[in-house]
Amino acid sequence: MRSPGLRALSISTVAAFCVSLGLVFFYAPIEAEEGFVQKIFYLHVPLAIVTLSGFVIGGLCAIAHLRTREARWDLRSYVAIHMSLIFGVGVLITGSIWAHASWGHWWVWNEPTLVSFLIIFLLYATYQPLRFAIEDPERQARYASVFAITAGAFVPLNFIAVRLSASYVHPRVLGSASNLPGSMMFTFLVSLVAMALLFATLCSYELTAKRTRIMLKARSRILGYQS
Amino acid sequence: MSRDVHARPGRPAHVPAGTIDVVRALLRKELLVELRTLESIPGMSLFAVTTFVVFHFALNQDTVSGQEAAGILWVTLLFAAMLGVNRLFVADADQGGFDGFLLAPVDRTALLLAKAIALLAYLLVLELIAVPAFALLLLGPPLGQALPGLLAPLVLGDLGVAAIGTLIAALVVRTRARDLLGPMLTLPLLVPVVIGCARATAPLLQIGGSHGTLQLRWLGTLALYDLVFGLIAYAVFDFLLED
């Protein structure tokens, strides 16, 4: 099955990534304190923002699913959360590398953003075990939606709680994005757009693959052979 | 005043039972079952006391205080609560309680409320046993000075555990591997409760404990958390009971 928007989306993602990597390496200035390592900021932070947005989008699609009872909303919710989990692994790895490079430890409990992210990641890691422990497809979709909504609401609350608990010992580069110099801010925004496009592209590939598989299954059932 | 002329004593036949009556009936059944089978509370309490003993040997300390004491107390209470959460809907799922409830023409939220209140009651009884046991076995400073300040975090923590525990218990009870999934889902969701309770409790359990102004901030966070998850549980619970 061909999806018309897929090719355009893929091409624009590749283009956006070329532009953003070009900006990161040749345009954005080297940060004075951290040096070259700070460039991982343009990968790590957009990745984290896109991941958390993906989790929240999964929750919103789940609300739409419970309201309309249409299976396509559940599929969207599933794909958004699944893709966010994969991106989430990337966030934890890049965050860990950055922490090691700038503070000398692979894991830093004083950085509330990193810690909240880990808790959220651990929670969402149970999404698939929960989902596939339910056999009936209709109930599976419904229960997964209930989980996605609960967890989606948990994302901001958890950030508040963990942030309150942390004492600010370490300097915070990304504490407020507003004090970034203009060239860094511009590079960051382009990287964010590129990352969001990558997320959207991968999600639509997975959605297309899933829809094709569902369609194939339906066709082969009509033709009368088991696959 | 013609309205009064037509008003009759007692409930008109077409009005279904009020939610409060249903909650009361369900809660009565819940507590009666617990009293007769004694499945949850004795197990939870025993587990908590045993965990204190385990902590004594694992830490190799006779007394603890401050943040350490708060951490041990809350981790133990949380894990003991998890046992109750895991049992909460098992009888309903296995022995047809859900079917019976769904056949009755009553508001489904009543089941959430009744179960959450029952769980809250279990937790309060658990704490009546576990907190004195903790003071006896491990706590360095005397419990008397900390007790008044301890009540608010205990109650707010219990409310959070009851709201989230009931929702997750209903979510996992009809899955394969429910005993595994329950704690896996509940623990990350309760991390903010642990943060709030342990931080609010720590200054009280210090030797010569004081009531810091810091505590109010944590109690506020806990109350907000309880409120939000209470509302979420209320909003999504119906969808778990459709078949």
Image: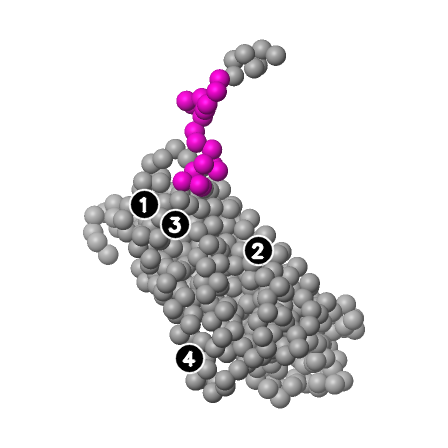
Q: Is residue A13 left or right of residue A143?
A: right
Distance from Cα at disc 2 to Cα at disc 4: 30 Å
For numbered disc 3, what is the local secondary structure?
Answer: helix
Mark 2 or 1 closer to N-term? 1
Which mark lies nearer to you, 1 or 4?
4
- Magenta segment: B8-25
Are the residues under marks 2 and 3 on the same chain?
Answer: yes
Could you tell which of marks 1 and 3 lies nearer the N-terminus? Answer: 3
Categorize mark 1 by other alpha carbons within 10 Å: few (<14), some (14-19), many (20+).
few
Mark toward the start of the polypeptide (1 vs 4): 4
Badge 2 marks a residue whose secondary structure is helix
CB atoms of marks 2 and 3 within 8 Å: no
Q: Which mark is residue B54?
A: 4
Which of the labelled discs sits on residue B31, or is there none?
Answer: 3
Residue depicted at 74% across the width and 85% down the height? A33
In this view, the residue in front, B22 or B138, is: B138
Residue A187 magenta-highlighted:
no
Q: Is residue A87 visible?
A: no
Q: Which mark is first along the chain, 4 or 2?
A: 4
Whether pointer 1 and pointer 4 mark residues with C-beta atoms closer than 8 Å, the reply is: no
Q: Quadrant of residue B108?
A: top left
Which residue matches tag 1?
B97
Q: Nearer the viewer, mark 1 or mark 3?
A: 3
Q: CA distance from mark 1 to mark 4?
A: 37 Å
In which quarter of the view is residue B223 placed?
Answer: bottom right
Indicate the secondary structure of the residue bearing disc 4: helix
